[in-house]
Image: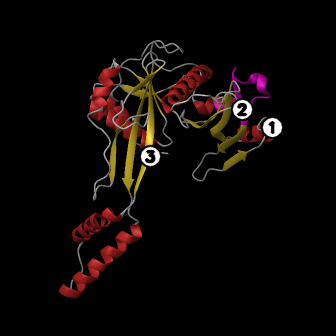
Amino acid sequence: MFKNLMIYRLAGGWPAEVAQLEEALAREPFAECGATQQKSCGWVPPRGAEHGALVEVVDGQWIARLAIETKAVPGDAVRRKVQDAVDQIEKTSGRKPGKKELRDLRDDALLALLPQAFARRSQVTAWIDPRARWLVLDAGSQGKADEVIASLVRVAGRDFSFALLQTQQSPQAAMTAWLAAQGPDEWPEGLHVERECELKGSGDEPAVVKFSRHELVTDEVRQHIAEGKLPTRLALSWQGRVGFTLTQALQLKKITFLEGVFEERATASADERFDADVALATGELTGLIADLVAALGGEAAPGLPSGFTDAPAPLDVAHDEATASADDPPF
């Protein structure tokens, strides 16, 4: 169910009741792109049933899903159409179009070609833990996460405060220490370093070393660390139950639930499978996130312990939106 995780801390202003969130998301339901529309975003029922609820509650966890549809016109097709228009103008008037006219010609060409473009649709699952006050997005890129956050801001207001989860120790510093360790007994309890990582040097043209299906507790890897190369991503497993790749930005990618976690179930209906999958996935990932944060020294927020029992002080949404806009998001 979850392949990637971006974790946000909810502060204040978020809907305290499911009905409030349902009402908010209903203000921006998904609709397919129009003939000349390049992108459309909106909320869809997470169970996939037409006219179903936009927020599902399973074991106290809230699940919502944003659909993103885009149309892309090949740049070469736009250039050819613009060139045809330029040739016609030069032929009939004997002049070359200026910069503004060229921009208008490009816009006209794009609008003319959009109805012929195929639409691509993707979905981002949003998981809210109302007790722990997490917003967790199954987004593989910052751009998709930004779409979810922007929609939540539009439908639920700018009083909603949030911030990316921050820890006392940076993921990069922790990964460096784990790779420099002499053996597994120096790794945090519950976490195991697997066989893939990426190390990056410094400077204008930094050296990059990638290991794949390679033992990492070696002198070779420790030598790269000693030379100043730092890990940007590292494959880990948690309790022998969940595999994932941790990045220097505290994102979890390539999440896989290991053998035995999702056993074959004799559930008869899609609804039963949905409930079981959500309950199992969120249950496992809740433990993983808590242990990972503990391994990184606890959550970095004034007055907030390493557990997840209290929320930090409200944050400035506008500031965080500007910070999050750089790529690889509040109610």
Which residue, as the protein is rendered here, is positioned at the far left? 93
Residue 268 is left or right of residue 302, and the answer is: right
Residue, x 27% and y 64% (percent of image)? Answer: 111
Q: Nearer the viewer, residue 91 or 224?
A: 91
Q: Is residue 3 above or below residue 165?
A: below
Q: Label 1's element? A: loop
Q: Is residue 58 magenta?
A: no
Q: Name the amino acid, label 2.
A: Val
Label 3, on which residue? Answer: 122
The numbered mark at residue 86 is: none
Residue, x 40% and y 67% (percent of image)? Answer: 75
Are dots 3 and 1 in contact, CB under 8 Å?
Answer: no
Q: CA distance from mark 2 to mark 3?
A: 32 Å
Q: Residues within 10 Å of mark 1 (few under 14, many from 20)?
A: some
- Identify the magenta region: 175-194
Label 1, on which residue? Answer: 218
Q: Name the amino acid, label 1.
A: Thr
Is tag 2's residue or tag 3's residue first in the polypeptide sequence? 3
Is tag 3's residue or tag 1's residue first in the polypeptide sequence? 3
Visible residue check, residue 69:
yes
Q: Residues within 10 Å of mark 3 (few under 14, many from 20)?
A: few
Label 2, on which residue? Answer: 193
